[in-house]
Image (spheres, helix red, strand yellow):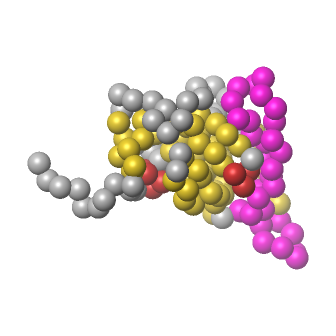
């Protein structure tokens, strides 16, 4: 077997509790090695353009299901990207940058915004965010219980 081309920073489970401190969110995140970019649940997504400041995006998100309190956020817009879902549908999504904390690790992450109300997890961690992490698919919550 070949050796890894890098030293892994940590081993994570298929599901982990993560904190997005700049957004004041603590939520369950699913590691998705099939997704290139990470995604965060967002509702009522609206781009805000102003002459005196860079573009922003306003949206509502939740730490979990419908019963959890809504967080209304306005953040700098980092990018807009075309994303193809697992069902083969292509759409443009707004991208934000924020800090992610996973156990003892803390690193910047790019998150696309889309409505995930029908999904079990409000956030997916994609390959770009997991560059120096290894995923143990048979384990969950290696960095803290929900």
Q: How far across and down, in percent of the image, does residue 49 sit? A: 83, 65
Kindly indicate the quadrant of the structure image that contains residue 95.
Answer: bottom right
**Residue 41 visible here:** no
**Viewer-nearest residue: 26 or 145:** 145
Q: Nearer the viewer, residue 46 or 59?
A: 59
Q: Is residue 112 magenta?
A: no
Q: Residue 62, percent across and down?
A: 74, 36
Please state the horizontal and vertical placement of residue 24, each as a whole percent of the image. 75, 47
Q: Total of numbered circles in the picture?
A: 0
Is residue 69 covered in magenta? Answer: yes
Asked if one can make out residue 100 in the rendered structure from this viewpoint, the answer is: yes
- Quadrant in the rendering for residue 135: top left
The C terminus lies in which quarter of the figure? Answer: top right
Q: Foreground residue, 2 or 87?
A: 2
Picture residue at 81% right of the left edge, 55% below the top: 74
Side (left or right) of 84 relative to 115: left
**Foreground: 51 or 76?**
76
Residue extending farthest to the left is: 1
Residue at the image position 50 percent from the left and 39 percent from the top: 143
Q: Residue at x 47, y 47 (%)?
A: 126
Picture residue at 78% right of the left edge, 72% below the top: 54
The percent coordinates of residue 55 (x first, y second) are 77, 67
Which span is picked out in magenta? 49-77
The relative height of residue 134 versus residue 30 in the rendered view (above or below) is: below
The residue sitting at the bottom extreme is 52
């Amino acid at each position: 077997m070949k050796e890894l081309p890098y030293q892994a920073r940590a081993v994570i489970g298929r599901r982990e509790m993560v904190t997005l401190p700049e957004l004041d969110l603590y939520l369950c995140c699913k590691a998705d090695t099939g997704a290139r970019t990470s995604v965060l649940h967002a509702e009522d997504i609206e781009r805000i353009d102003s002459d005196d400041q860079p573009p922003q995006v306003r949206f509502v998100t939740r730490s979990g299901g419908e019963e959890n309190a809504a967080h209304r956020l306005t953040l700098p817009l980092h990018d807009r990207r075309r994303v193809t879902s697992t069902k083969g549908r292509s759409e443009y999504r707004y991208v934000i940058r924020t800090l992610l904390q996973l156990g003892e690790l803390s690193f910047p992450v790019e998150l696309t915004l889309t409505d995930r109300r029908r999904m079990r997890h409000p956030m997916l961690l994609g390959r770009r965010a997991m560059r120096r992490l290894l995923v143990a698919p048979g384990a969950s919550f290696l960095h803290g219980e929900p």
